[in-house]
Amino acid sequence: MTTVRIGVMYDRDWAPEGLPGFAREVEALGVDDLWVVEDLGWNGGVSAAAVALGATERLRVGIGITPAPLRSPALLAMELATLARVFPGRLVAGVGHGVREWMVSVGVAPRSPLALLEETIGSVRALLRGERVELSGREVRLDGVRLVHPPVEPPPVVAGVVRPRSLELSGRVADGTVIAEGHGPDEVKTARALAERGGAGPDHTLTVLAFCCVDDDPQRVAETLRPQVEGQGAWLGRPAEEVFTVSGRAGEAAERVHDLAAAGADTVVLRMAGPEPARQLGRVLEALGR
């Protein structure tokens, strides 16, 4: 049976003061990862990661994702280095394009999103390795910047991307790729192939986000997930019924996790929907034999 890390998302709609308790609760359940979100107007991703790391002892915490246009690569590297020094081996840093409309609304939309993402990830990774970075790029300029306290163990920097050219770019410049909610096994295979076309090797990780609702009543599952699948379907440009979810009875949800793992997912991050998210997560973990 394919081994896969299991993560859970702290949903952007949940109040930030609930994060420490939730982090401790899911750590006690035995989950591998907790992922936090940075969407414009919701919570700060780096600060949320710090809260989750400080509240737990072993959980790996992923930032999914920081929009590259919102952050200077130098500042982002400084923030990530601080967390990686204090919590070595427990951080994954996700970076992405950001939602174009949101970036326009705060006046930071780049001329070339692809160039900005490539230059951001490349320079952040170099800074985290302790290198002195000189870059006069299309979107990023760094004039001899170096971190005074680079991490002993640089955290992986992964790209949260969707489109083919961005997936190829991720394979070329990032340590891994984060795939948005709604993508099923066939699309995970395609994402892996595109990342490999860009240059990804066997160590390039795939993290797949997935909506999750566990209930023995199929009608309740469908009603609970309807807002998520309709909204994500509209964003992805597909009918709601084609939005992949990890849902159903606990055993059915576990099988869908296995399907994603068999397609190449290294980590599956569950975005819980409905009441008692930790209880639902516990049922999935039990069905997976955790």
Image: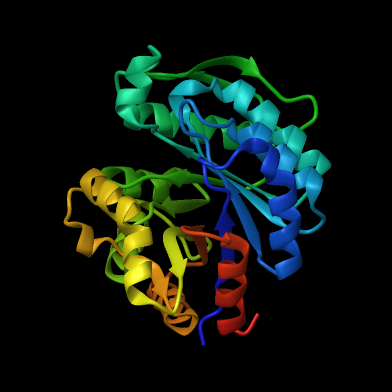
- Spot occupied by residue 267 in the image (x, y as percentages of width and height): 53, 64
Q: Is residue 90 visible?
A: no
Q: Residue at x 69, y 53 (%)?
A: 22
The image quadrant of residue 208 is: bottom left
The image quadrant of residue 145 is: top right
- Image height check: is 11 above or below 126? below
> In this orientation, which residue lies closer to the viewer: 244 or 275?
275
- Spot occupied by residue 35 in the image (x, y as percentages of width and height): 58, 50
Colour style of the rendered protein structure: rainbow
> In this orientation, which residue lies closer to the viewer: 27 or 172?
27
| Residue 151 in the figure: left or right of residue 280 | right
- Which quadrant is the C terminus positioned in? bottom right
- Image height check: is 184 above or below 240? below
> In this orientation, which residue lies closer to the viewer: 19 or 185?
19
Q: Residue at x 69, y 27 (%)?
A: 78
Q: Residue at x 49, y 38 (%)?
A: 95
Q: Is residue 194 visible?
A: yes
Q: Residue at x 30, y 24 (%)?
A: 101
